[in-house]
Image (cartoon, rainbow, N blue to C red):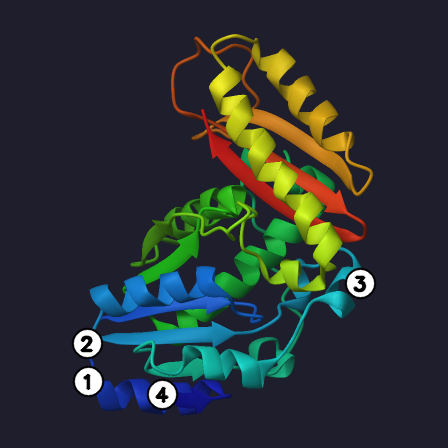
Amino acid sequence: MILVKTRSALSEQLQLTGNEVEVGFVPTMGALHRGHLTLVARAVAENPVVVVSIFVNPNQFNDPDDLKRYPRNLEADLKLLEGTGCHMVFAPEAEEIYPGPDNRKFNFGKLETVMEGKHRPGHFNGVAQVVSKLFDIVQPRRAYFGLKDFQQLAIINAMVKQLSLPVEIVACDIVREESGLAMSSRNELLSPEDRKEAALINQTLNRAAELAGEKTVKEIENWVTETINNSPALTVEYFEVVDNESLQRIGNWSEEGEKTGCIAVYCGKIRLIDNVRF
């Protein structure tokens, strides 16, 4: 496994693999966990060369304090990646990705005005900026993303289509802790007590999926919010049942198309997201 920190070094290493070799790419912001490793494992199984990037992208944080808190430990990340079959780790500094301001403005329409887009203004523009730059640098055939970030996946698919990029976006299932809590780099910032409380999020979502036939969409949304807010450690920012394609809130279960319930919850100052299929 080779660590590179510049575009030129990465390009040189990729050229050594041959121009026709398909590259699998796993973009991360570090603080790696088992969820990331499953993405790497799938990439290794499906591609002869795999690149993992580790870069905390400042452009997708609308809260400066959130950016400061975000966990960083490159040494631990590299240790976790050893033996996974990953060939290269690209861990650039911010100046390498953004040698100058990135003033590009993407337009994803209604996909970016709801849920995460509504509560984190500018977040998805920052995501599109960095992912498009990384795709340009790595030139992957396939890129792997987790379904925990359900809305982000829709945004990235839209970006690939808008820019006509020859990249296949591979969606991978959510990986959970034993308690059911969705694995996230932010979980490192939770106290043991808060981590136990946060398990209520997935427990409530699973129960909501079971109750969907008995309650209206609005009743389910209210029940989930009230149930989680009953925990003194948790505060729901939003819970919405949306159409998988448009990401717009649905009014009733009879509407056509697949549906997903998406949630953001604060556990103290730590913001957690999850989702469940209905």
Q: Relative to residue 187, is residue 77 depicted above or below?
A: below
Measured in 3D between alpha carbons, the distance from the residue under mark 2 to the one under mark 4, in whole angstroms, is 17 Å
Q: Residue 256's image quarter?
A: top left
Q: CA distance from mark 1 to mark 3?
A: 41 Å
**Category of crowding for the residue at label 1, using alpha-carbon neighbours closer than 10 angstroms: few (below 14), some (14–19), many (at least 20):** few
Disc 3 packing (10 Å; few <14; some 14–19; many ≥20): few
The amino acid sitting under disc 4 is Met
Whether residue 59 is situated above or below residue 161 in the rendered picture: below
Name which residue type carries label 1. Answer: Gly
Local secondary structure at mark 4: loop
* Residue holding disc 3: 64
User: How far apart are labels 3 and 2 at the CA level?
Assistant: 40 Å
- Residue bearing mark 1: 18
Image quadrant assignment for residue 1 = bottom left
Q: Earlier in the sequence, mark 2 or mark 4?
A: 4
Tag nearer the camera, 4 or 3: 4
Q: Nearer the viewer, mark 1 or mark 3?
A: 3
Q: Nearer the viewer, mark 2 or mark 4?
A: 4
User: Mark 2 highlights which residue?
Assistant: 21
| Callout 1 touching callout 2 (CB < 8 Å) | yes
Q: Helix, strand or loop at disc 2?
A: loop
Res 118 seen here: yes
Q: Residue furthest left?
A: 20
State the residue in front, 191 or 103. Answer: 191
**Residue at figure coordinates x 65%, y 29% from the top left:** 239
How crowded is the residue under tag 2: few (<14 C-alpha within 10 Å), some, or many (20+)? some
**Callout 3 touching callout 2 (CB < 8 Å):** no
Residue 42 lies, in percent from the top left, at 29, 62
Asked if the residue at tag 4 contacts the one at tag 2, i.e. Cβ–Cβ closer than 8 Å, the answer is: no
Residue type for callout 3: Pro
